[in-house]
């Protein structure tokens, strides 16, 4: 039994390091299969992905549920990387205070389950605001992407600069384009709250605010194996209560609140008389007064059914397949272009947990956190930001790593036919008109040649659009040199359309008409 904590610590460290590697990888060396497996083991994203089809995430969600049914909330202490981050803070607080002792406190179950029910209800009405704000894996991803990435990339760039001066060119400079001050500030606020709660109150976040913790708390009520106190061996020393960071052990009454227990096994490891043991449900049955959670639980599972029937499979019919109306440049900024695989904006916003995994793997960094472009409900969900980059024509990485199903997987061929938006050209803003100068940057960057140059005046050429083959990648907008607004820009398709394949033109070879060798 004493080895349970050691096993738990090893597993938690391994998962934490792998998850950190996934979010902090800016070189593209982390294999996609690792990202897929880790994402499938995260409860809320895997649960959301259940409604997009039977995938590996479905089995990941089933694994977490079965693990909880068997052993209680060990997910919170081993698989959840945000839980491990809290444990690191708790460990440091113990070091700084020489020793950090805890006392039993009744878990704020009513508030916890009320937040779970509120999150579920908001999901039903089409808002992921509470889920995005509180979901642990997504918050861990935002902490590393918005705070860890800038630090790591800055260190890399500084090292590359120094090595370059010494004639060592093993490292290279990496631009960091997706960082935004407001998003960094919001992430810092959450991290500050998390650190405070962990430093002062242990795992209070898990038992007060976390929706995954609330759901697992309900499931853990029927767990098969639980920690039991052997009264014959117990001396009422209170060590088990003092090391319980979830405040769920009451040494005086010799009871454990399994709804709040996160399965850290600190109590078993600390007990000097081995009075705590891990035993099956059939070994010893104890009458433990349950927390009244029937109503919130019914509300939650009712919300689940409603979500499955009305939210996930619904489609935004406002567009009706006709494409967007022509918007001005300023209007188009308020309607975000959703990433490939999103299908439609409503579906994407209803499923995205803003974990920023797609942002962290995007090679050109065209994906950036939003603020209120999706409304308050979609705060910090990713959008295409063509001011900093454009979407690579052959890249599908973001569609392969999404853990919640907000972005469905696409292969390269299918992605090339997805039309995220359509280009709009304002002739009077083009420098060919305003400055009478040649340009053609938009045409040169367009991968499908939806923008081509046609004769205008004298030797000047002017862009002409063919939106039937435009995929909305933003290459033309990013390349356009006009300021303060672009002469050519992408207007979002709220429902993604299918672009026609660009025509294949055979290049003329002058050698084919010659029978003899030309020289």
Image (spheres, rainbow, N blue to C red):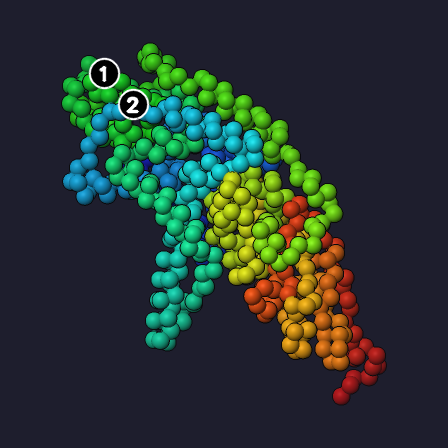
- State the residue at coordinates (54%, 61%): 387
Note whether 470 is above or below 248 in the view shown.
Answer: below
Quarter of the image where one finds residue 166: bottom left
Q: Where is residue 80 in the image (x, y as percent from the top left)?
A: 39, 38
Q: What element carries label 1?
A: loop
Quarter of the image where one finds residue 408: top right
Mark 1 or 2, closer to the camera: 2
Other-residue count near label 2 (Cα within 10 Å), few / some / many at <14 / 14–19 / ≥20: few
Note whether 293 is above or below 476 in the view shown.
Answer: above
Q: Quadrant of the C terminus?
A: bottom right
Other-residue count near label 1 (Cα within 10 Å), few / some / many at <14 / 14–19 / ≥20: few
Tell me whether circle 1 and circle 2 mark residues in contact (CB < 8 Å). no
- Residue placed most toward the observer, 399 or 71: 399
The residue under label 1 is: 253
Q: Where is residue 58 in the image (x, y as percent from the top left)?
A: 54, 34
The residue under label 2 is: 106
- Residue placed most toward the observer, 518 or 510: 510
Q: Quadrant of the N terminus?
A: top left
- State the residue at coordinates (35%, 62%): 155
Work out whether residue 134 can be spotted: yes
Horizontal side of 5 relative to 329 (left or right) equals left
Note whether 251 is above or below 494 in the view shown.
Answer: above
Horizontal side of 126 relative to 105 (left or right) equals right
- State the residue at coordinates (39%, 27%): 112
- State the residue at coordinates (37%, 71%): 161
Work out whether residue 4 can be spotted: no
Note whether 477 is above or below 276 in the view shown.
Answer: below
Q: In the current view of this chain or complex, which residue is farthest to the bottom?
A: 519
Q: Where is residue 86 in the image (x, y as percent from the top left)?
A: 32, 39
- Residue placed most toward the observer, 436 or 69: 436
Considering only order in the chain, which callout, 2 or 1, is on the residue closer to the N terminus?
A: 2
Q: Where is residue 38 in the image (x, y as percent from the top left)?
A: 46, 42
């Amino acid at each position: 039994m004493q080895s349970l904590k050691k096993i738990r610590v090893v597993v938690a460290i391994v998962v934490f390091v792998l998850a950190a590697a996934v979010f902090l990888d800016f070189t593209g060396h982390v294999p996609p299969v690792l990202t897929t497996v880790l994402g499938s083991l995260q409860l809320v994203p895997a649960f959301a992905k259940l409604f997009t089809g039977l995938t590996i995430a479905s089995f990941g969600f089933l694994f977490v549920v079965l693990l909880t049914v068997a052993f209680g909330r060990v997910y919170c202490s081993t698989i959840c990387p945000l839980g491990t981050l809290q444990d690191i803070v708790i460990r440091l607080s113990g070091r700084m205070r020489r020793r950090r002792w805890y006392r039993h406190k009744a878990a704020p179950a009513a508030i916890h389950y009320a937040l779970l029910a509120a999150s579920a209800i908001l999901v039903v009405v089409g808002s992921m605001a509470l889920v995005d704000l509180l979901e642990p894996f997504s918050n861990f991803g935002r902490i590393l992407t918005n705070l860890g990435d800038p630090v790591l990339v800055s260190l890399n760039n500084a090292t590359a600069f120094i090595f370059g001066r010494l004639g060592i060119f093993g490292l290279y400079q990496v631009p960091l384009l997706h960082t935004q001050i407001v998003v960094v500030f919001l992430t810092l606020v959450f991290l500050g709250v998390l650190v405070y709660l962990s430093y002062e109150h242990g795992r209070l976040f898990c038992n007060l605010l976390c929706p995954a913790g609330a759901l697992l708390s309900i499931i853990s009520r029927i767990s098969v194996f639980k920690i039991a106190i052997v009264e014959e061996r117990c001396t009422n020393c209170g060590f088990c209560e003092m090391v319980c960071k979830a405040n769920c052990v009451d040494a005086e009454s010799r009871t454990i609140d399994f709804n709040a227990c996160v399965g850290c096994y600190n109590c078993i490891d600390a007990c000097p008389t081995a009075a705590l043991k891990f035993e099956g449900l059939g070994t010893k049955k104890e009458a433990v007064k349950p927390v009244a959670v029937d109503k919130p639980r019914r509300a939650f599972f009712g919300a689940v059914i409603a979500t499955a029937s009305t939210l996930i499979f619904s489609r935004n019919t406002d567009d009706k397949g006709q494409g967007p109306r022509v918007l001005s440049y300023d209007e188009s900024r308020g309607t975000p272009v959703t990433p490939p695989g999103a299908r439609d904006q409503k579906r994407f916003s209803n499923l995205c947990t803003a974990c920023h995994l797609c942002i962290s793997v995007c090679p050109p960094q065209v994906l950036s956190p939003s603020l209120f472009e999706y409304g308050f409900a979609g705060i910090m969900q990713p959008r295409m930001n063509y001011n900093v980059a454009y979407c690579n024509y052959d890249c599908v990485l973001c569609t392969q790593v999404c853990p919640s199903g907000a972005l469905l997987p696409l292969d390269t061929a299918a992605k090339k036919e997805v039309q995220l938006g359509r280009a709009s050209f304002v002739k009077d803003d083009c420098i060919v008109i305003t400055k009478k100068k040649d340009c053609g940057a938009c045409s040169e960057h367009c991968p499908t040649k939806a923008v081509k140059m046609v004769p205008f005046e004298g030797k000047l050429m002017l862009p002409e659009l063919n939106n039937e083959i435009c995929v909305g990648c933003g290459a033309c907008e990013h390349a356009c040199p006009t300021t303060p607004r672009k002469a050519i820009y992408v207007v979002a398709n709220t429902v993604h359309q299918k672009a026609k394949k660009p025509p294949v033109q055979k290049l003329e070879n002058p050698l084919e008409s010659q029978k003899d060798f030309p020289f």
